[in-house]
Image (tube, rainbow, N blue to C red):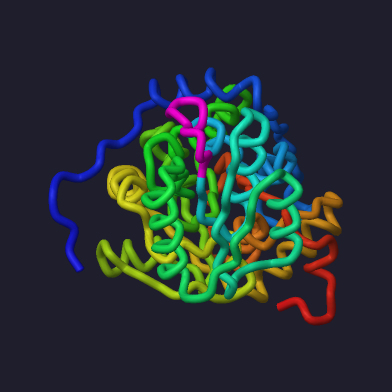
Amino acid sequence: MTVEGPAPAIPTRDDIAAAHARIRPHVRHTPLLRLEAEALGLPCPITLKLEHLQVTGSFKVRGAFNNLLSRDVPETGVVAFSGGNHGAAVAHAATALGHRSTVYVPAAIARPEKLERMRAFGAEVIVAEGSVADVLAQYADHAERTGALSVHPYDTAPTLCGQGTVAAEIEEEEALDTLLVSTGGGGLIGGIAAWYAGRTRVVSVETEGTATLARTLAEGPCVTIQPTGIAAGSLGGPSLGLVPGAVVAAHVSDACVVSDAEVVEAGRRLWEAARLVVEPAAAATLAALISGAWAPARGERLGLLMCGANVEPGWMLADSAG
């Protein structure tokens, strides 16, 4: 498959700053946590951005509010496609702003705790059979058939601009040399890389079963996968979005891939060292360090984004984990 036409426009820092002002009343300014190297058995101290403390348990609420506040929402409401975090965010934003919401979830990656979160925030949840790509098509058909506003999880400028506000917050408090970011379809890393625009190195982290960006860098655009493994529900984009892809091509050249077992070990260390419970997608950034997939330079000011925590507590301690 080839992509024709001009490359999508990359969101600017001004676009992201405008999104930040727009959504500020509706989201939490999440804290930074600085951890000493010895606490996690690492070669250097790290700074964690605790975005898993966000109002819906993940960064996704930033993009959700930016979409709904910057676009016209029809009476039929909004529709989203999600493995859980984006759906919960869209449901919360829609309910808070007085709109209806529908979320399509692939049955293959549906997790009970995430389905419960979406319904609790007010969404009608449709668990659909078929591949991730099949369910994406069903979601797109719903939008066309009903006129509902489509809120894509990662491949629109409003989504990237909303997610990029997390980088704006980090930079208000701390200058980093490198930030490790978990990647699914690319909305988060795309927004963050668009904000930093090369001033801070942004490193992608994926699991072996969700490595769309790493494969895109190695093989070229239009890589498509069937997501599998421990983080498929969060990082399970079947391909890198076109808009994030344009940002990645301009500003991201480093990608790490970690195993599910390494993610479980990272989750355990976060709990043991700091009593943090995050989901596998968030633990993946630490997994890149403890596995050696990312080796920081001496004196490197290193940040890790804790992107979400919509997971059953103790997942990393269960006998069956990994």
Camera-side residue of 136 and 57? 136
Q: Quadrant of the N terminus?
A: bottom left
Q: Indicate the quadrant where residue 138 lies.
A: bottom left
Q: In the visual, does 157 lie left or right of 97?
A: left
Residue 171 visible somewhere in the drawing:
yes
| Residue at figure coordinates x 37%, y 50% from the top left | 144
How far across and down, in percent of the image, does residue 233 sit?
Answer: 60, 64
Is 181 drawn above or below residue 290 in the view shown?
above
| Residue at 66% in and 39% down | 92
Question: Which secondary structure class fits the magenta region best?
Answer: loop
For residue 262, above or below residue 267 = below
- Residue furthest to the left in view is 5
Residue in the foreground of this view, choosing between 295 and 171: 171
**Quarter placement of the C terminus:** bottom right
Q: Which of the 4 quarters of the picture holds residue 96?
A: top right
Res 12 → quadrant = top left
Examine the structure image and report whether residue 158 is included in the region drawn in magenta: no
Judge by depth and name the residue closer to the eye, 180 or 76: 76
- Vertical order, 313 against 209 (above or below): above
Q: Evaluate whether residue 201 shows in this view.
A: no
Picture coordinates of residue 285, whole percent (x, y): 60, 56
Residues in magenta, as a range: 68-78
Residue 121 at x, y = what percent?
Answer: 72, 44
